[in-house]
Structures are given as structure tokens and as C-alpha cells.
Amino acid sequence: MKRFCTIMMLLFIAVAALQAQTANPQQYKYIFAVAQDGSGDYNTIGEAIKAMRGYPLAPITLYIKNGVYKEKLEILANNTDITMIGESVEGTIITFDDYSGKPYEKGKHGTFSSYTVKVSGNRFTAQNITFENSSGRVGQALALYVDADQALFINCRFLGNQDTIFTGGELCRQYFLKCDIEGTTDFIFGPATAVFDSCNIRIKVNSYITAASTTAGKQFGYVFRYCNITADSSVTKFYLGRPWRAHAKTVFMYCQLPAQLAPVGWHNWDNPANEQTTFYAEYKNSGPGAATAQRVPWAKQLSKKQARQYSLENIFSGPQIGRFSAGSFFENTQSIPFVWPGKTGGK
């Protein structure tokens, strides 16, 4: 009964907030500007996010001037429909240095509280921003934790080591386009359906790029398309992936693979049973690491017919809740100009 009352109270608060916005939506602010030099509305990104209205009735755009913003940020589930645009990907940097095992006031951080930025609000877009975990090689340390549906990252950088990006939410769909991603071990991991399109993926040690935890019954997990995979000169052997959970799904298509890729390609995480349930596949990759003759026998080579199933429309099928734009979220990938609004006033 107590749980029911709590749920009803939360619903009442949400409805009341929406009614207030509906009554006079113009009174609420939908353009925000952050600059460390004082030329915007706020000096920190966190201040701007806190000022945003939950479940807005119009899309919110946040412009961020170049600067190194040492902030730990969380975009809550009610902070939907936010677009964050950096002045430049090299100059707009969000960084923090938490890691698993690091002490803080409530004890010690675990993997999933070590993030620099956590995004839970659906229909989130980031463009021209660097997300960094600067803690170094100290174990699990997330630069990005995203468990939002229809999340889109365009021309962003993700810098870290182990566990750089966690793609959370088994029903969530996330699209990384023209991004740079670096790490050491399992630095792209999680259960979401995620596409990495035309990205630069850099592995820095002998280890594994992906650790998908796709849930049973899902058609798609991770799909890498037209990506350039590179390895540091010190790397002698790495793997495309290993299954964090038994039904992991990962596909590399039309990617450039370096010579340091282990000829077997994939790893079973020292559990032969995973070979019966995991789906790992490749299609028309190129480069010195693309030869498939020595791949593990349980990995697949897609046929032309199978490869046609890996269109964005198929991968991201399902409800496309575009409240403020027509079409599917993965179609709205045109670059948004950085036009500095200055101080915008309002609430």
C-alpha cells in the first residue's frame, strides 16, 4: 500500500508539472548557454541542467563554450529532449576522475557510480563534446553511462581506459556517429542496442574492445559499421569482443581492422558454454586484421542477405517517440551550427 501511494504521488507531481507548463509554456526557458568566462547564463554545465524543466513541452538546447569542465553530471530520466552542443569537440571537455574503489562520503565508488556523465533522459543528443574519465589506469572508470532510449552522439570523443562507455538499458537504442572512442579493457560494454557508425575506435593495451551483455531474444546488440579500428604500437594482440553475458551480440561490418587483431578474432571469456549462445559476426571488413580463415569456429560470417538486415531502420525498429521532430531519431543527424546565444534570460 505504501508503494502504491508513493507511485500515485509521483504521478500527481508529474501531471501537475505538465499542467503548469501547458498553461503558459512561454514562461519556461528552452535555450541555455554555458561559458566559464561569464558570457552565458551559467558558468557550469551542472547549473544549467538543474535549471531545466522536467518533461519539457519543447526541445531544450544547451550551448557550451570551449573549456575544461571538471564536473560529474547526471541527466535524470525526466530531463528528456535535451541537445547539448559544444563549441568544438577538442575544446569542449567534460572530465572527472572517479573510479571503482575510490572512496567518497558514502563509502567507495563501484563501476556504475564512477561515471563522468550519466544520461537517463530519453531523446538526448550530444554534438562536438569530449567526455573524459581522467582517473588513469586504476580499474573500471566510466566516461559515459547512458541508459536513455533514442540517444544520439555526433562527432564526440570518449576518453578513458577500462569501461569507457556503458550502454545501459536492455530496451534502449543508442547511436554513435563519427565519434572517437578509446580505452583498454571492455571499453564499450552493456545491454543496449547500439550502433557505432563511422567511428574511430582505439585500443591501448592487449585486451578486448567490447563486452556486450545483450539479453536473450533480442535481434541486435552492438553493430559497428564503417569504423576504423586502431591499436597503439605497444599492442601485440587484442580481440573484438568477449561476452559479458551469455547472449551477447556484436557485429563488425565494413570496418578497417589492424594487424594486431588476434587471428581468432573473438574470445569466449574462458567459458565454452558462451560459444553456444553468443552471436559474433563480421561482414566485408578490410585491413591486415580482416582475414577470417583462423576465426573461432563459433563466430559467423554474414551472407549478403543477412547483411541487408543490418540497416538502421531494422536495428532501431520499435516506437520512435519523436515528440518535437518528424522521423526516427537516427535520421536527425545533420550537424547543428554552434551559434552562441549569449545570455538568454528567463527562468
Image: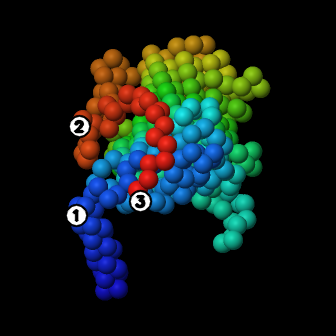
Question: Closer to the N terminus: mark 1 or mark 2?
Answer: 1
Give the x, y percent position of residue 271.
57, 45
Look at mark 1 in the image and give the residue it sits on.
23
Q: Categorize mark 2 by other alpha carbons within 10 Å: few (<14), some (14-19), many (20+).
A: few
Tell me the residue at 47%/33% (across/down). 338
**Which type of secondary structure does the marked residue at label 3 adopt?**
loop
Residue type highlighted by circle 3: Lys
Tell me the residue at 32%/38% (across/down). 329
**Which type of secondary structure does the marked residue at label 1 adopt?**
helix
**Would residue 27 appear left or right of 175 to someone viewing this image?**
left
Look at mark 3 in the image and give the residue it sits on.
347
Whether residue 101 is visible: yes
**Which type of secondary structure does the marked residue at label 2 adopt?**
loop
Give the x, y percent position of residue 3.
35, 81
| Marks 3 and 1, how far apart at CA | 16 Å
Question: Closer to the N terminus: mark 3 or mark 2?
Answer: 2
Give the x, y percent position of residue 109.
66, 62
Tell me the residue at 54%/58% (across/down). 47
Tell me the residue at 73%/65% (across/down). 103
**Would residue 50 appear left or right of 317 to someone viewing this image?**
right
Residue type highlighted by circle 2: Ala
Q: Is residue 48 above or below residue 278?
A: below
Q: Which mark is residue 326?
A: 2
| Marks 3 and 2, how far apart at CA | 28 Å
